């Protein structure tokens, strides 16, 4: 029977091969670098073969090491599958779970679900990172990742669809009142378009082609911005038309601060996946996230009635939504007060009440100025935890 010392040495060998470094393997295993190095050295001595080519900067598998690695992966997967099949019903998710999420979609839609899961399972430790690049699962020790868009073929990942991301062409009502609505895709060239700048390149807009396929259109964008939330803010403040993910502007569309256009030419949505390395049995903490994400997240990012998931103990809005919420408020203020001098006193008061109804708690009497007539209060933004 194989001893625990030999089994631990095999695990250290596999982790080092995946990570490409004794140091990274030690970090992921929670051991010291010397402990990992000694375990692998004893394994090589027992097998009487060299498993790694070693340099001062990197390690790589020898031919014998590659053969042994394939056998070890198969054996460890079978062991994990046997343990999980017996314990799946009784094991409580525990330990450290590393998740990689998109930098904007993740905080808004996925984190509330993960936090709810953390409340349910007190032994679960959560590490969430927010990046828009493709992460290396082995090198960075990631258990799960959420990705938006089509997955690359041959990526050796297992995936589950969470939902879809629809894109909506929209602008503020005041922009449409001044410049009119585009009647076709071609007429966008006569409008001020705002496009996403990614890695130094302007992203094309997506529309539905004649046969239902996705048609990519390079619009003439006068404003090119490298952040989606900044694009949303610019659109809310009447600077032009933009194509924005529906999950980012659904609140503004419902409130009337933005209006959609060219909806009949809307392109098919992009799939949103949760992905994890293929070929290995996932521990209960990872499987619990997949199951919880499937049954409880309801990420309706491609639906017209999408609403952000909420959990009971959240008391403050996310920092990433501050700009959008402020611009939503400012756009409403601007629409109501731009002709304030010609408004009757009654209209002015009704305007205040409309803003208070749309955004409760955002306005309060200014304590630094004398109180005006009760029907005409001086209002300011409240700098409170409701905004930060």
Image (tube, grey):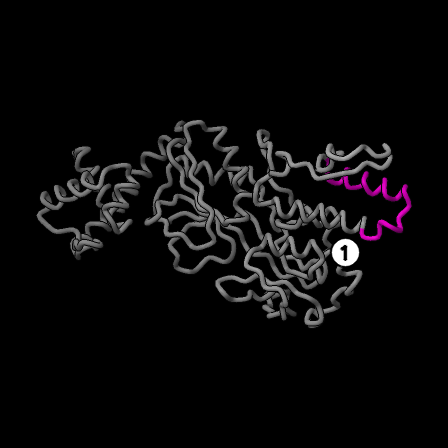
Q: In this view, does 177 lie to the left or right of 160?
A: right
Disc 1 target residue: 173
Rendered-image quadrant of the C terminus? top right
Task: Specify few, some or many for label 1: CA neighbours under 10 Å numbering under 14, 14-19, or 20 or more.
Answer: many
Q: In this view, does 184 lie to the left or right of 101?
A: right
Instruction: Please check the rendered image and state whether residue 346 is part of the magenta-colored stretch, yes or no.
Output: yes
- At 84% from the left and 52% from the top, the residue drawn is 339
Q: Which of 212 and 385 is in front in this view?
A: 385
Q: Give the x, y percent position of residue 282.
A: 38, 40
Q: Give the x, y percent position of residue 315.
A: 60, 32
Instruction: Please check the rendered image and state whether residue 358 is part of the magenta-colored stretch, yes or no.
Output: yes
Q: Which of 14 and 182 is in front in this view?
A: 182
- At 84% from the left and 34% from the top, the residue drawn is 372
Prevalent SS, magenta region: helix
- At 58% from the left and 32% from the top, the residue drawn is 314
Inspect this view and state whether residue 74 appears.
no
Q: Nearer the viewer, residue 42 or 231?
A: 231
For residue 190, what is the image quadrant?
Answer: bottom right
Q: In this view, does 178 lie to the left or right of 28?
A: right
Compared to residue 40, the image places residue 314 above or below, namely above
Rendered-image quadrant of the N terminus? top left
Compared to residue 297, the image places residue 21 above or below, namely below
What residue span does the magenta drawing correspond to?
338-360
Q: Which of 280 and 85 is in front in this view?
A: 280
Q: Give the x, y percent position of residue 183.
A: 75, 68
Helix, strand or loop at mark 1:
helix
Q: Is residue 38 left or right of residue 272?
A: left
Compared to residue 139, the image places residue 185 above or below, namely below
Q: How many marks can you see?
A: 1
């Amino acid at each position: 029977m194989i001893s625990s010392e030999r089994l631990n040495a095999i695990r250290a060998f596999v982790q080092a091969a995946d990570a490409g470094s004794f140091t990274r393997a030690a970090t992921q295993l929670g051991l010291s670098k010397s402990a990992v190095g000694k375990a692998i050295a004893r394994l090589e001595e027992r097998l009487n073969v060299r498993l790694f080519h070693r340099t001062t900067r990197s390690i790589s598998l020898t031919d014998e090491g590659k053969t042994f690695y394939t056998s070890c992966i198969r054996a460890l997967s079978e062991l994990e599958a046997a343990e999980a099949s017996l314990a799946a019903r009784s094991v409580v998710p525990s330990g450290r779970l590393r998740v990689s999420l998109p930098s904007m979609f993740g905080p808004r839609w996925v984190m509330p679900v993960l936090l709810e899961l953390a409340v349910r399972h007190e032994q679960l430790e959560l590490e969430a990172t927010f990046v828009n690049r493709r992460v290396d699962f082995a090198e960075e020790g990631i258990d799960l990742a959420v990705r938006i868009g089509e997955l690359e073929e041959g990526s050796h990942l297992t995936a589950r669809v969470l939902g879809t991301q629809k894109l909506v062409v929209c602008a503020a009502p005041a922009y449409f009142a001044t410049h009119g609505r585009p009647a076709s895709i071609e007429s966008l060239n006569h409008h001020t378009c705002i496009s996403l700048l990614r890695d130094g390149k302007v992203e094309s807009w997506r529309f539905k082609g004649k046969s239902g396929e996705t048609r990519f259109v390079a619009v003439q964008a006068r404003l090119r911005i490298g952040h989606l939330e900044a694009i949303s803010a610019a659109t809310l403040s009447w600077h032009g038309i933009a194509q924005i993910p529906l999950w980012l502007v659904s609140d503004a569309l419902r409130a009337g601060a933005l209006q959609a256009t060219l909806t009949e030419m809307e392109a098919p949505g992009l799939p949103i996946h949760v992905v994890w390395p293929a070929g290995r049995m996932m521990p209960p903490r990872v499987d619990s996230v997949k199951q919880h994400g499937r049954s409880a997240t309801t990420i309706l990012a491609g639906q017209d009635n999408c609403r952000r998931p909420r959990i009971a103990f959240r008391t403050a809005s996310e920092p990433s939504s501050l700009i959008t919420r402020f611009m939503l408020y400012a756009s409403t203020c601007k629409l109501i007060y731009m002709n304030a001098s010609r408004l009757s006193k009654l209209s002015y008061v009704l305007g205040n009440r409309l803003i208070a109804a749309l955004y409760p708690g955002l306005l309060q009497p200014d304590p630094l100025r004398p109180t005006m007539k009760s029907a005409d209060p001086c209002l300011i933004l409240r700098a409170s935890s409701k905004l930060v």
